Image (spheres, grey):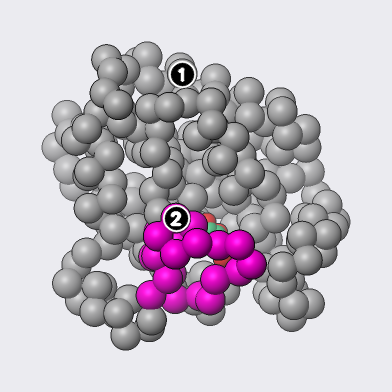
Amino acid sequence: MSNNRKPLLLVLSAASGAGKSSLCRALLARCSDIVYSVSCTTRAPRGGEIDGKSYHFLSEEEFQRRVASDDFLEYAEVHGNWYGTLRQTVEDAMVQGNSIVMDIDVQGARQLRQRLQRLPSGSVIRRGFVDIFIQVSSMDELRRRLEQRGEDTPEVIEKRLANAEREMAAVPEYRYTIVNDDFERAVDALQDIVEKEQAV
Ligand code: 5GP
């Protein structure tokens, strides 16, 4: 659906367990002109995840083939698996005048910023770039959420927590920060940012 608002390239990053996926879903339910950027990954699907909707689940070989073909706008290794955003996914959405929301890690966000710097300042993708970091109040809270989610082995949880410390250090690189302690308030804050940026 096209409209006269500025199409955004919304980048959401967070430590896993900070509620980023739920926030993304809530934003998409509220805003019909935003599409979700389905990433590629080499990790195995978790319960309920659908290929082509949650992620494009690729073999390591297929992922590396796409890297060699320069198909990714950005890609990174996170928790021992590869993740990447297809250039085509973003271009298709923005050409149609839609905004797109990407759930990517801090390394991917850095790559994207560097790549956008090389585009002309008037380019739609560059003008639409908005990066937001979703935080939780403490590491204890993050641990509690990951354990409650029950989707990862204790070993993977420890890996995610160690990674979270590194991810939190990247907060100053982001234009916006949202603390997701109260879910509804966090969704409102996200929607406010989107509406403000679409109107610029
Ligand atoms: P999960 O395995 O929990 O779905 O995601 C793990 C991490 O990978 C999250 O921090 C998520 O933001 C990140 N991620 C998901 N898709 C991409 C992507 O396309 N690119 C990058 N750089 N990170 C991604």
Q: Nearer the viewer, residue 40 or 159?
A: 40
Q: Position of residue 162 (x, y in %)?
A: 69, 69
What is the number of the mark on residue 53?
2
Q: Disc 1, disc 2: CB below 8 Å?
A: no
Q: Position of residue 71 (x, y in %)?
A: 22, 64
Task: Classify residue 140 by image quadrant.
Answer: bottom right
Residue 5 vs residue 95: left or right?
Answer: right
Q: Amino acid at mark 2?
A: Lys
For marks 1 and 2, give the one nearer the viewer: 2
Residue 33, compared with residue 3, is above or below; it is: below
Residue 56 vs residue 137: left or right?
Answer: left
Q: Residue at x 25, y 36 (%)?
A: 94
- Under circle 2, the secondary element is loop
Q: Residues within 10 Å of mark 1 (few under 14, many from 20)?
A: few
In the rendered image, which residue does mark 1 sit on?
A: 195
Q: Residue at x 17, y 43 (%)?
A: 119
Over which residues does the magenta segment extend?
39-58
Magenta stretch containing residue 44, yes or no? yes
